[in-house]
Image (tube, helix red, strand yellow):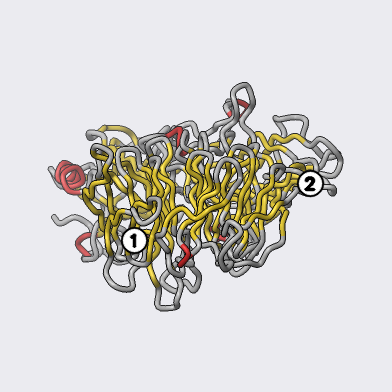
Amino acid sequence: MSFPTAANIINPASKGYGVSLEKGTANEDKMFLRLADGPQRVSGIQTTNEQQLPDTSQNPEDIAAGLGQTFSRTRFSGGEGLDRGHRQSTDPAFDASRYWDSRNVDVRPAKAGAPEQVTLLKAAEKWRTSTDNNQFMTLIGSTLYWAEEKDVKRSADPTAATPTVTSEDPEGGGGTPTNISGLVVLGEELYATLNNEGIHKRSTGGTWAHWSDLDTDAGNSLTQDIWSVKGRIIAAKGIQLYEAKAGAASVLLHTLATNLTWHSVIDAGSAILAAASDGHIYSWADEAGTLTYKSLENFEGEIPYFMGMSQGVLFVGTGEATVAGGKIGRLWIGEVIGHKIRNLQVVRVWGTGTETRNRVPQAFLPTRDSMYFSVLEDGTENHLWRFDLETTGLSRDMIFDASGICQGLLTIDDRLFASFQSLHFWREHLTNYATPGWLIGPLADNFTSRPKIQVGLRVDTKLPTTEETITLKYSTDPAAIEDSDHSSWKTGILNTLNTLQEDVESEYAINNVESRYLASQLVLVSSTDYLVSPTVYSYAQRSLLATEDLTIRIYVNVSDTVKKFGYKAVRIPGHGRRLWTELHDNWLNNSIVLELFRPNIKVRGQIVNMSTPIQGHTDRGELTTFTVLDVQGIKV
């Protein structure tokens, strides 16, 4: 006797069948079974027990006995760029301190003895107005020197509210005033390139005089044409790179092909590196006091423009030209072993194939613990970025209302100073905070792709006065993390001093929100006088797994007695054993669709457990043989 399938049974429910199993599209792949429900064995449906997931909380208050999963952040020094949390990582601690993006907030690691926290960054202020083309800056001790077209300016008090500025003539009192195309320091002496008048030097006594006959032509609009490395002055004269020396004794290092340009020269420890517009970085080594050419590294399809070196880490800012006339910018990091560049990797990319702006990372500035550089963000802003050498985290730092090339970047008394071609001189404000600031966290999924019922938010804050505010927003739209003003952001918690959550156990309830992901955005607003910043120590969001996964236990009749609707029961020896064997050999642990007729429910999953034949009584006292099937799957 064949088994009951869709090929030989029509209207199975009316003929006494209670369930169907389907494993294919053919009629023979859909089998109908009779249930053997009886005393203390009733087929039932329940939600699958929630799988124990990794603990994703970071805040001690989040580690508590309770329902659901908590996603939290207490550290942010890992930097930007994490789109989904959580992800498997070789360094879980690093991912646990990362976020997606930020603006005007300070995420640098806490100093020893201080708690991890997020505050606003200081604002940028314009401290000197100048629209001259060449605005290079450098330091001798605590005195700031900079170029403005044909003049060298200096200030011994650049951090003062109104710095005292003195003008100097790099011509040394003679010759025709010439635009300055580069300005560097070697020891305590200042050197300036005056294009076709050669290189002039300012002595430690403050006197300017002609030093080298090496002229630098019209200079390069991207950066200066003179560099100070390894106790030497290196200068570019068009396509030629020289070790500049007094008088006519300059030594030619390398000549590029026609119409190419030298962009950047740095001291890379064991070598001197020079980036050129032919897409190569050249290296020289000091051998017995003489610079000897060693090798070159190629950047396929792009050009290295700016370089920096700090704590043995090499930074390279490259550009790839677009049809729209802009440049896609990339930040590379690597190391220099001997005279060769090794282990280069891209850290971030700015722009796309339709880019109309020059997005190349430029003006690298190493400090004790960081590498700073500038990137043109749009038509009105340059963003200063910070690479933390301790955490390797990359974060957006200060923002300048200037759209030109950054020609100078340095620190004085731990305050950042910057100059932009034809767009004034800027510095970090001493007291005022930039406001508002925001930080967007990753899309939280708590290590599971299942839908979740989002139930609550919490934020741990400090607000010194009644004027600062902290807002925690949320969104279920993955696209929201790309835009701080996305229409899907909803305000969850708005904290002022009067509404501050003193009880860390309390949380803001989110109602009727079901999604796989939940994004969060912290918004910080300073006091109205910009002198006081709010502080965030942590934020958290809690979710419950949605009940989509079901476990169905059914008792299936596998006796030799076959009942046909409207007919007397017939006993077929061996039928039950063959049916049980068919289920065990061909259906167990296979992908199936189970449909219960009453109540009507359909589940896609698999038979995960099947008992051996068991004898029992039906509710009428008849002896029957049955097997127990456990099916786990998703309701469809």
Residue shown at 42%/32% (left/top)? 40
Q: What residue appears at the point 33 percent right and 66 percent down from the top-left corner?
A: 239
Secondary-structure class at tag 2? loop
The residue positioned farthest toward the front in the image shown: 174
| Residue 85 on image: x %, y % | 48, 44
Q: Residue at x 62, y 56 (%)?
A: 152
Quadrant holding the C terminus:
bottom left
Alpha carbons under labels 1 and 2: distance apart: 40 Å
Which secondary structure, mark 1?
strand
Left or right of residue 195, residue 35 in this image: left
Q: Residues within 10 Å of mark 2 (few under 14, many from 20)?
A: few
* Residue 625 visible in this rendered orientation of the protein: no
Residue 470 percent coordinates (x, y): 74, 44
Q: Which residue is mark 2?
A: 161
Q: Which mark is residue 512?
A: none
Instruction: Tell me the crowding category of disc 1: few under 14, some 14 to 19, or many 20 or more residues within 10 angstroms, Cα based.
Output: many
Where is residue 183 drawn, in percent x and y?
A: 52, 54
| Lateral position of residue 583 relative to residue 276, left or right | left
- State whether residue 57 appears in this view: yes
Which residue is disc 1 drawn over? 276
Is the Cβ of the residue at disc 1 closer than 8 Å to that at disc 2?
A: no
Residue 617, compared with residue 557, is above or below; it is above
Foreground residue, 297 or 539?
A: 297
Which quarter of the figure has residue 151?
bottom right
Q: Amino acid at mark 2?
A: Ala
Q: Tell which of 42 and 272 is nearer to you.
A: 272
The mark that comes first in sequence, 1 or 2, is 2
Which quadrant, please, contains the N terminus?
bottom left
Identified by mark 1, the residue type is Ala
Q: Tell me where residue 405 appears, x and y as whole percent.
A: 54, 63
Q: Is 163 or 301 nearer to us in this picture?
A: 163
Judge whether 277 appears above or below 629 on screen: below
